[in-house]
Amino acid sequence: MTDAVRLLVRADDAGSSWSSNIGCMQACSDGIARSVEVMIPGPWVTHAAQVLNACPDIDVGIHLTLTSEWDAVRWRPLTYAPSLVDADGYFLPLLMLRDGDARPCLAHHDWSLEEIAAECAAQIELGRRMFRNATHISCHMTQHFKLLDPRLGSVIAELCAKYGLRDDAFGYGLPRFQGYPPQPRETDARVHAFLAQLEALTPGTYVFIDHPAVASPELAATGHAGYRDVLADRTTCLQVLTDRAVKERIEALGIELISYADL
């Protein structure tokens, strides 16, 4: 029985914006993140490939995407998938219903298993071509797509085996390190909470997931009803992940920072 504490810090949503690409990079180069998840249908995925392929030490995950949640920027499937999109051809905002969020969701759509399988395969195939350091998959806006339908667990497992990728450990039970509560979106409060939770960790392997980004007019215009403070949320996330006190506490506690590749 080992008494080691290992922490996998995962930076999500590269490919969705320039701000996210740079934020995820900085979270790794200047901070404690070790894996970056890339949304292959995202409008900034080519830029993400340019910056991430230049840093071979950064572990890359193909962040399978079946939703498009923002008001001002949206994305479409790579494949012909009429059962997965709205009347304008974009992915729906939600995978499954959320409390207080009445936007359309895929779960209440007449979706096709075959179309989801083909879309996931296309995203994985393109992601493997674009990102030299891709080691695993993860699922956007959910713990795992098998929660939408158990059959999708088998579909994704088969695709991972075919393309030599690991299926997301979070989706299969790696305990989640919360880090800090959603509110307030303030750096000092988040750093304080993060430090306290680091102190409380018991032996084991944990995953922390958030969405670091740098400030930009693009990020300031990103949001949807009920989540308009995206800029404050994601820039303070980056500030926590690169905070000197956080890095020093991790070292003092002997916590090992790992990536999916280390699993």
Image: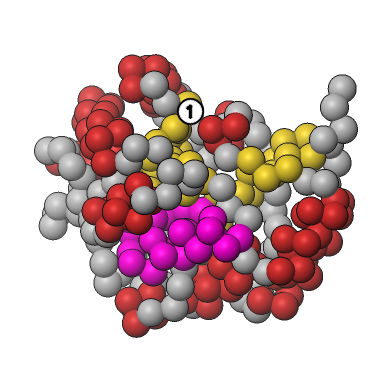
Q: Which residue is denoted by mark 1 in the rendering?
A: 167
Coloring scheme of the render?
secondary structure
Q: What SS does tag 1 mark?
A: strand
- Residue 251 position, x and y percent, is 79, 53
Please check the rendered image and state whether residue 17 is part of the magenta-colored stretch, yes or no: yes
Left or right of residue 33, residue 128 in this image: left
The magenta span reads 11-31
Considering only vertical position in the picture, is 87 above or below 128?
below
- Specify whether residue 126 is in view: yes
- Residue 166 position, x and y percent, is 47, 26
Crowd band around label 1 with a 10 angstrom C-alpha radius: few (<14), some (14–19), many (20+): many
* Residue at image point 39% right, 43% down: 63
* Residue at image point 40% right, 36% down: 134
Instruction: State which quarter of the image contains the N terminus.
Output: top right
- Residue 148 position, x and y percent, is 43, 35
* Residue at image point 32% right, 76% down: 218
Question: Residue 13 or 98: which is nearer the viewer?
Answer: 13
Q: Quadrant of residue 214?
A: bottom left
Q: Quadrant of residue 228?
A: bottom left
- Specify whether residue 237 is in view: no
Left or right of residue 4, residue 152 in this image: left
Please check the rendered image and state whether residue 205 is part of the magenta-colored stretch, yes or no: no
Question: Residue 115 or 185: which is nearer the viewer?
Answer: 185
Q: Amino acid at mark 1?
A: Asp
Considering only vertical position in the picture, is 178 above or below 229?
above
